[in-house]
Image (cartoon, rainbow, N blue to C red):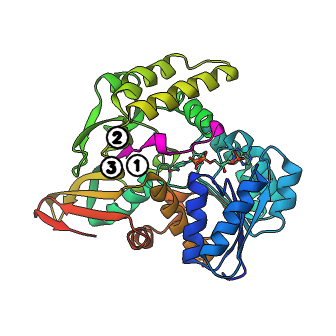
Amino acid sequence: MSETSILILGGYGNTGRLLADYLLQETEVRLVIAGRSIEKARGMAAHLNLKFPGQRVTGLSIDASDQAGLRAAFSQVDMVVVAASTSAFVRQVATAALDARVDYLDVQYSTHKMAVLQAMAPRIEAAGCCFITDGGFHPGLPAALIRYIAPYFDRLESARVGSVIKLDWSGLNLGQATLVEFISEFMDFQMLAFCDGRWQQTGLVSMLKPVTMDFGREFGRQYTVPMFLEEMRAIPKLVPGLRETGFYVGGFNWFTDWIVSPLLMLVKVVPDRSLRPLARLFRWSLNTFSRPPYGTMLKVEAHGQEDGQAKAINLTLYHPDGYVFTAVPVVATLLQLLDGSARKPGLHLQAHIVEPRRLMRDLARLGIEISGIKENTNDHATL
Ligand SMILES: NC(=O)c1ccc[n+]([C@@H]2O[C@H](COP(=O)([O-])OP(=O)(O)OC[C@H]3O[C@@H](n4cnc5c(N)ncnc54)[C@H](OP(=O)(O)O)[C@@H]3O)[C@@H](O)[C@H]2O)c1
């Protein structure tokens, strides 16, 4: 592990800089911090070299649209972690990684990215590379949590995963590319949930009649809508007997949820140039209307049978900082990859390649608050 070097594309962004920090803390890897600005890349490398011993970090300027530049940079490392809002350039990035025969992990939520990578899957496997997509918090954790919780039941019948993401958006310096990528995906996400044993499209009805979940803490009952994540597709097959499942995403604030989001969904087919003003409107609504309490949470509500008795478990994961909650699951997955235990050639989803019990131990060790409540016994247990 000591010789391994990893290039983080987007390494000085909100997600990338935390990934770098935790990786230097948890492993002996060497890092290349990359993005389009050489000043920012070198500045972040200098900051990290002051914080951690061993002069393990360098900075590099790369544009994700430049396939030759990517290939040259990737050929100097063992792995690339994509923490940049560059899903539009997934073909260039993934092809360069394949050409350089390096492993790959990304944290983007993008249907375009998924389609491109799935089409490349046979080549990825033939090259012996391990590609992990949909890393992070969501995507990244919901299906892993169901894989984790299923063995606690003889028969798991229902497992809904919900999220709360309350951020102080005005304090985040999000890049324009990140916002444009975010809203273009947001305008397009599928409201699919697995109900009564089959995947069902809920559409705008689920915005008018949202599912509520009680997240406890300072959040209480929140409304959520189904959001299809690729990692959920295989869950009903992996957990026979499951009748209800899905990922349910919580709202941002009343203005973004009830005014801006429906507008984005109504104007789905807009030319690319209209995305920038929409991204500005979205950023303004997040900055203006988001209020404390802030925090990020995932909750699994699971019901089933054990020893012939009805059983229910609520599992919650919490961190006050949504970006820490994004970076930590990626680092926990990389730990399993770097020691070889999870590494296998081909295209994989983070939520499915990771061993869930070790993942949960590492999440807890790295600061994610995890609690489970066995409701049938009223036993409040920390897992
Ligand atoms: N799975 C999850 O749970 C989760 C959670 C949060 C975020 N994300 C995803 O993580 C990604 C990053 O989000 P963020 O909030 O960290 O974004 P951010 O703070 O805006 O940082 C984006 C980074 O990407 C770099 N970048 C953008 N365009 C680039 C290009 N063409 N070539 C090279 N580098 C480029 C930026 O640097 P320059 O602009 O200077 O090049 C910056 O370093 C997004 O795709 C987001 O959707 C996933």
Label 2 CA crowd tier, 10 Å (few <14, some 14–19, many 20+):
some
First in sequence, mark 1 or 2: give its number. 2
For image coordinates 80% across by 64% down, the residue present is 101
First in sequence, mark 2 or 3: give its number. 2
Considering depth in this image, is 80 or 287 the residue closer to the camera?
287
Q: Quadrant of the N terminus?
A: bottom right
**Residue situated furthest left in the rendering:** 377
Identify whether 208 is placed above or below 200. Answer: above
For image coordinates 35% across by 25% down, the residue present is 207
Is residue 153 at all visible to an observer of this figure?
no
Is 346 one of the magenta-colored residues? Answer: no
Point out which mark residue 197 bears: 2
Rendered image quadrant of residue 147? bottom left
Name the amino acid type tagged 2. Answer: Gly
Label 3 CA crowd tier, 10 Å (few <14, some 14–19, many 20+):
many
Image coordinates of residue 240 in percent, x first then y, are 36, 54
Give SS at disc 3: loop
Give SS at disc 1: helix
Image coordinates of residue 223 in percent, x first then y, are 29, 35
Q: Along the horizontal axis of the image, is 357 left or right of 43?
A: left
Point out which mark residue 236 bears: 1
- Give the Cα separation between the discs numbered 2 and 3: 7 Å
- Give the Cα separation between the discs numbered 1 and 2: 8 Å
Q: Along the horizontal axis of the image, is 348 left or right of 229?
A: right
Name the amino acid type tagged 1. Answer: Pro
Question: Is mark 1 in CB contact (under 8 Å) with mark 2?
Answer: yes
Which range is magenta?
A: 160-177
Considering depth in this image, is 234 or 352 the residue closer to the camera?
352
Is 161 one of the magenta-colored residues? Answer: yes
For disc 3, the marked residue is 242
Q: Is mark 1 within 8 Å of ligand 1?
A: no
